[in-house]
Image: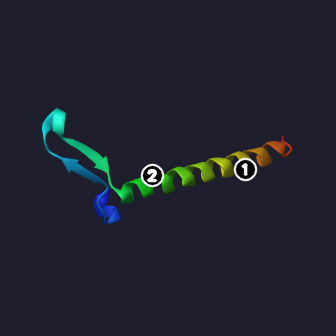
Amino acid sequence: MERILGTAMLTTRRGGAQRGGAALTPAARHFVRVYRQWREDVEQASRRAFARAARRPVDD
């Protein structure tokens, strides 16, 4: 993903279970916010489209 986006998404710290770890970069946190908003927008659009389709008469 980092190669595709062209930026680091994770920082890591060596040190094992007690001192090591990983954290999202600011770019990754931004990406997550954008993705969540996009997903919400898609969900709302899908609900509206389904509601419109459900109101149409059924062709037999």
Label 2 element class: helix
Could you tell which of marks 2 and 1 lies nearer the N-terminus? Answer: 2
Q: Is residue 28 visible?
A: yes
Picture residue at 38% right of the left edge, 55% below the top: 28
Picture residue at 37% right of the left edge, 60% below the top: 27
Label 1 element class: helix
Picture residue at 77% right of the left edge, 44% below the top: 51
Q: Position of residue 55 (x, y in %)?
A: 84, 44
Residue 32 image label: 2
Decide which of 32, 53 is in the foreground and name it. 32
| Residue 3 horizontal side relative to residue 59, left or right | left
> Circle 1 sits on which residue?
49
Q: Position of residue 22 (x, y in %)?
A: 26, 45
**Mark 1 residue crowding within 10 angstroms, few (<14) / some (14–19) / many (20+):** few
Identity, as a three-letter code, of the amino acid under mark 1: Ala
Identity, as a three-letter code, of the amino acid under mark 2: Val
Q: Is residue 59 visible?
A: no
Q: Position of residue 21 (x, y in %)?
A: 22, 42
Instruction: Residue at the far left: name it.
Output: 15
Picture residue at 30% right of the left edge, 47% below the top: 23
Task: Tell which tag, 2 or 1, sits nearer the viewer.
Answer: 2
**Which quadrant is the C terminus positioned in?**
top right
Q: Position of residue 10 (x, y in %)?
A: 28, 52
